[in-house]
Image (spheres, rainbow, N blue to C red):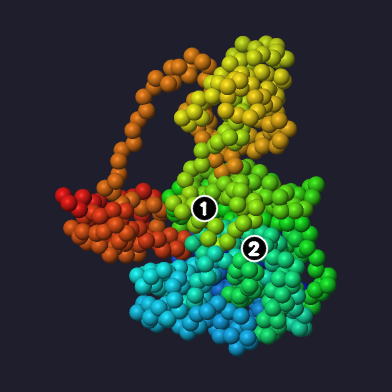
Amino acid sequence: MFSKILIANRGEIACRVIKTARRLGIKTVAVYSEADKDALHVELADEAVAIGPASALRSYLVIDKIIEAVKQTGAEAVHPGYGFLSENADFARVLDKEGIAFIGPNIRAIEVMGDKIESKKFAVDAQVSTVPGNPGLIEDADHAVRIAGEIGYPVMIKASAGGGGKGMRIAYSEEDVAQGFRSAASEAKSSFGDDRIFIEKFIENPRHIEIQVLADSFGNTIHLGERECSIQRRNQKVIEEAPSSFLDEETRNSMGNQAVALAQAVDYQSAGTVEFIVDKDKNFYFLEMNTRLQVEHPVTELITGLDLVEQMIRVAAGEKLSVKQKDISFSGWAIESRIYAEDPYRNFMPSIGRLVRYLPPDEKSEDGLTIRNDTGVFDGGEISMYYDPMIAKLITHGPDRESAIKLMASALDGFYIDGINHNVSFLSALMNHERWIAGDISTKFIEEEYPDGFDRQYPAGEILQRFCAVAAYLDHVHNRRRRSISDQMRDQDFTFTLKRVVELGPRKIDVTVDEKSSDSMVLHFPGDNEFTIDELEIVSDWTPGQPVWRGSINGEGIVVQVRPILNGYELRHAGCEANTRTYTKREAEIAARMPEKEAKSSANLLRCPMPGLVVSLPVEEGQAVKAGEPLCTVEAMKMENILSAERDCVVKDILVSEGDTLAVDEVIMEFESADS
């Protein structure tokens, strides 16, 4: 076994590897860029080595700097995590030359399977069913248009060295192909240092299901079942689960056997993943093989009880697999939600800044239910514009899919983040979506259910009544504390009934508060109310200042995020948000007379929706543009975002230049009407 390993990565995966290494008694070395000098993985590791500027192209992707860090610290092996150099055969080859163990597969497997183009050719030669496409390299945009026409639309433009949704575009027309090729190549170059592109047929409405394989250097290869990864946005996985609710045992075994056969064909070792797309009739097609650890590996770990990072380390150290296929069994259901630094209300544009509050739910395992949080950030830390926007991976495990979903919904309700924009409300809404709960999903789920993007969800029905109950409880507890401090309530056992008006956004709901004890009350609704239940019993030990309200409503456990606003609270629960204020009757009458300020219009301005770098400005001052035409490309967190005109107009002033770094909402250009 190794005594010291270096992790050639950052963020949550570096922290994840350190966690297992520490349990195995292995010392760890972190590497970090200038932007990561205060990062969590640097703090957790036994040693840390600076490797250069913030840009990954000048730090994490520079092989010589990683090798120098290994030599400097005396590490015996390198774990690459995922992304960066994890599927780079040249990196593995240099390590081998230097006598440094690579905690991953052999070089041939990386070359054949880690390269999306070569893996397609190999799969075809091995008579593995693959998606129709052109396995050759695409030379330029014109070549891409010609090949796409031969395959037939829609097509998928993919980076050969890609992964994690980077360098991928779906094209439905020649214009889409030309633009998509340039963006995908540029994005791939920035993320992986490799701008090679290929094109394949895009199969609409498929499921994305992958098989985890594990192999040693003695010819032993097994699979650990499947993961369903169909909930995706921009080809980036958002939610994963294991097992899949769609597969039957026959299909599962067929996919597993095919994945094992493919791994054996390249003499694979270590952990790897064979990805498939599956149509509505359960026909499956080889998509690609990831010769590394996957982001979603925790769901497999929770249903199998195996630590995949440990298995990778042991295989790299020359050990045989300690389990055989017959030893593998699957227990319960696991779900993973990816917490991203992005604004779901602005088309999921990246967000950066300081985590003013970062309070994830407690990790625990009790009564057959498990909550796990893999993260690389901390309260008060910074989210950088230079890297992937992932904040954390929240994972839940239960005896069945229903229990795992309910636990995830509750855990997301309690995942409190302030200081940056994030997608927790979106994930929470997904957990409460009827179609997701029913398992009726495909890779187009988000596109179909949110065709116009994700807007703030206002509570309705039972959720609205919960908001009303919690708002009334918060107000009552606050008032009781004020009376206690001012000595207006000498008898702490005194209980009473009060009439209140709860304002939720535009709604005003009459309620009667009947206090039963210091931590419980009953809320009564008038006989003509819109709810199916007229009375709610609320129990909680919440105290003013706590950011999360935990309690029960009519015996059901409820978790609600609480943020103070003027004269009230903003509440977040089940993917919904609402500003709430609780008044006396007289206060409600006065509040109704208060005028509201109107927001200033910014229809003639193009603002930067996220902090980022201006990559291109394809327009000039005085130029007339049509709706949909690109105006500016901004790069943030390894993704290129094209900002297009929302209507026909004329560019009046351009206020930035290529190469400028912009803040969120910074004005890029001004417009005037096309007919002015």
Crowd class of label 1 (few under 14; some 14 to 19; many from 20; radius 10 Å):
few
Residue located 51% across and 15% down the image: 585
**Residue 182 x/y as whole percent:** 38, 72
Residue located 58% across and 16% down the image: 499
Question: Closer to the camera: disc 1 or disc 2?
Answer: 1
Figure quadrant of residue 229: bottom right
Q: Look at the picture and state if 201 lies above or below 267.
A: above
Crowd class of label 2 (few under 14; some 14 to 19; many from 20; radius 10 Å):
many
**Residue 573 x/y as whole percent:** 59, 39
Nearer to us in this view, 406 or 484: 406
User: Looking at numbered disc 2 in the image, what kind of residue is underneath it?
Assistant: Glu
Whether residue 519 can be seen here: yes
Q: Which residue is mark 2?
A: 228
Residue located 49% across and 14% down the image: 586
Check the picture and name the quadrant holding the N terminus. Answer: bottom right
- Sequence-first tag of 1 and 2: 2
Q: Look at the picture and state if 469 lies above or below 86.
A: above
Nearer to us in this view, 260 or 609: 260
Q: Are marks 1 and 2 in contact (CB under 8 Å)?
A: no
Residue located 69% across and 78% down the image: 258
**Residue 395 x/y as whole percent:** 67, 54
User: Looking at numbered disc 1 in the image, what kind of residue is underneath it?
Assistant: Glu
Q: Residue furthest right?
A: 327
Q: Which residue is mark 1?
A: 449
